[in-house]
Image: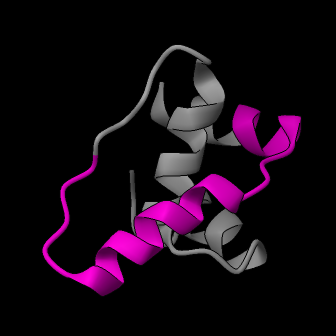
Amino acid sequence: MKTGGPLESIASRLSATPSQLALAWLLRRSPVMLPIPGTSSVAHLEQNVAAASVHLTDDDVAELTAAIE
């Protein structure tokens, strides 16, 4: 995905980081999939956990999915 593309645009609109948005998208795609992101600090762990609180609309998911496929 290009810098400045849909990931950054939607993340900015939702006050989330691109990493949080990517995790939120993965969580939304399947109720049986659980991403296990790596982390190197407590701050990074907190960002990863906060991704579960990012609310993606159907339009957000469609835009992200289209950008990836």
At x 42% / y 63%, what residue is drawn?
Answer: 48
At x 70% / y 80%, what residue is drawn?
Answer: 15
Left or right: residue 42 compared with residue 51: left
Residue 24, image x, y percentages? 58, 48
At x 39% / y 50%, what residue is drawn?
Answer: 1
Of residue 42 and residue 37, the one placed in the foreground of this image is: 42
At x 79% / y 54%, what residue is drawn?
Answer: 55
Left or right: residue 53 compared with residue 52: right
Residue 63, image x, y percentages? 71, 40
8 vs 64: above or below: below
Residue 52, image x, y percentages? 61, 53
For the record, the magenta segment spans 37-62
Which image quadrant is residue 50 in? bottom right
Left or right: residue 37 compared with residue 27: left
Residue 4, image x, y percentages? 50, 72
The question of residue 1 being in magenta is answered with no
Of residue 62 and residue 55, the one placed in the foreground of this image is: 55
- Residue 14 visible from this viewpoint: yes
- Residue 5 visible from this viewpoint: no
Which image quadrant is residue 10 in? bottom right
